[in-house]
Amino acid sequence: MDRTRHPALRSSLFAALAAATLVAAGLGAVAPSAHAADTDLMRNGGFESGLDGWSCTANSGAPVSSPVHSGTAALKATPAGSDNAQCSQTVAVQPNSTYTLSSWVQGSYVYLGASGTGTTDVSTWTQSAPSWQQLTTSFKTGASTTSVTVYTHGWYGTAAYEADDVTLTGPGGAPVQIPAAPAGLAASGATSSSIGLSWSPVTGATGYTVYRDGAKVASVSGTSATVAGLAPSTSYAFQVTATNSAGESPKSATVTAATTGGTTPPPLGHALVGYLHASFANGAGYTRMADVPDDWNVIDLAFGEPTSVTSGDIRFNLCPVSECPTVESLADFKAAIKAKQAAGKKVLISIGGQNGQVQLTTTAARDTFVSSVSKIIDDYGLDGLDIDFEGHSLSLNTGDTDFRSPTTPAIVNLIDALKTLKAKYGSKFVLTMAPETFFVQLGYQYYGSGPWGGQDPRCGAYLPVVYALRDSLTLLHVQDYNSGSIMGLDNQYHAMGGSDFHIAMTDMLLTGFPVAGDTSKMFPALRPDQVAIGLPASTQAGNGWTSPAEVTKTLDCLTKKANCGAYQTHGTWPGLRGLMTWSINWDRFNGGEFSKNFDAYPWS
């Protein structure tokens, strides 16, 4: 812990390459006026009916009432991560015919184009349009072309753009027919919080809408989807419709499926989690295990560290007398652990921390990790394990792009090691994780080095570990501190230090999110009892200290939907597990302010 992280930035080389790509792509030309008999073929080109007729990638587009070029509405679309905020519509046309495409736009690097022309697909763009600017291009359809796709989009990592009054003039084609209802809907791959669905493709469909118990829950372009954020041991009814520019099909036949029971978490109730400086000293002073206040439900011993970065050999020793003059004897330390456990507390070994880089790059390191961590747990009689991998411990190899099936050895071996430990110690084994926002929530925008390289390969690198262990995970308490600004599900950036940041970051974990903006790769929601909010206990403990009043507002919003401020959550979670802090020592140094505020909070 104790490290400042910033959101991933593309390198200057990558920016230069992107700019070159933009220049190369600007192939559009001003087209001649359409024939007088031609008509505008676009459906809802002025967005007066919202997004009716349009499909936007990664839910990136929305109708707005200001700014508009004409009428009362326009499109605003926001690129995020590897998504360029493309909004498109399929339009019926005639073969061997000439068409003129036009739109008014605002923003930087805004594109207008048409694909599927049967001849040469066209696009035109503007590098900068601080006020409304008209883009126009033209094309001729091929001998067998009966439909084209008209689109607008921005550029990766840039700000939102606006578009209005999109027109396509030329001879009209045969009307697009509403597609038939999908057939073959089937459920598979159920977990305690998600269910996978698949169905047969429908001729003429450009997208599909998924319904759960009659409510729309997802829109996808392919013939499969994973519905996340579900309750354990619960049955759900699913239907699917097919969509295109003409409208939406009738709903498919209903398929019923149930989630699994999941793993029953240890009976912690609302928990206060704290790290105890057990192996080192700093400005907060040493605290004996016996002197840890009773407020703390979970005590993480900081830290077990490796003998080398790639050895997997984890060692834990009490702080030496030379560094901590008041340190207790080993026998007294172990006796105090037993006393805490007898009082209902959980005591874990935390692996890693700011200085303890751990990379399980080989199966030998994996096996050594399992045996050495087991030895610590057994020697000290501990309840489980906390993974606090920071720095460069977790990083994704180039080409490792799907968190659901990672290929990076250090990731795969860690997952295997944790599953082995869980299987060895059984259902009472407590497994927690304390990643930084860089490794989790930043995955909403960026994942690994990205589709073209140039991103920090650590972006979202904890996601495959959390996903693989989601049914065994007791607690995830992301460090909401030492963080740069992070984009929330509202597609706005949030800065640490106030309730808004913690609400937005926690909402992402409890709602789920598309990784790198890809709606086909949804990171599923965690159960509320699996989530605690990580905060520094005092101003000395880390950047991003949050006042007790703001912490209370955070809990009010997430558990009662009260005092939410600007950010609107996607639910209410009275079962939110609680708070984590760095650290017990710093809280004692600060007069117990953090723990006292937690104790005073009215959870019900």
Image (cartoon, rainbow, N blue to C red):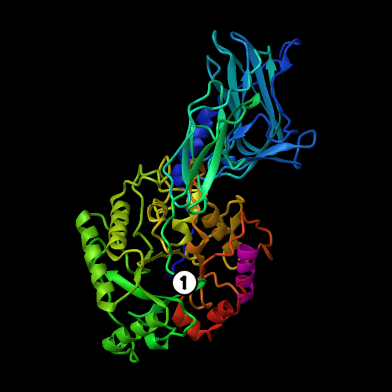
Q: Is residue 278 left or right of residue 147?
A: left
In the image, residue 546 above or below residue 319:
above
In the image, residue 254 above or below residue 320:
above
Q: Where is residue 463 in the image (x, y as percent from the top left)?
A: 42, 53
**Which residue: 37% across, 85% down?**
339
Image quadrant holding the N terminus, namely bottom left
Q: What stretch is highlighted in magenta?
A: 548-560
Q: Where is residue 542 in the image (x, y as percent from the top left)?
A: 49, 73
Which residue bears the numbered disc 1? 268
Image quadrant holding the C terminus, namely bottom right
Q: Quadrant of residue 249?
A: top right
Mark 1 element type: loop
Q: In this view, does 143 lie to the left or right of 339?
A: right
Do we see residue 330 in this rendering? yes
Count residues near mark 1 (Cα–Cα under 10 Å), then give few for <14, some for 14-19, many for 20+. some
Q: Where is residue 65 in the image (x, y as percent from the top left)?
A: 76, 41
In the image, residue 36 above or below residue 224:
above
Q: Quadrant of residue 354?
A: bottom left
Q: Quadrant of residue 573?
A: bottom right
In the image, residue 594 above or below residue 86:
below
**Which residue: 54% across, 8% down?**
143
Q: Where is residue 175 in the image (x, y as percent from the top left)?
A: 66, 16
Front position in the image: 517 or 269: 269
> Does residue 160 belong to the magenta stretch?
no
Q: Residue furthest right?
A: 71
> Does residue 557 belong to the magenta stretch?
yes
Q: In this view, does 37 lie to the left or right of 518?
A: right
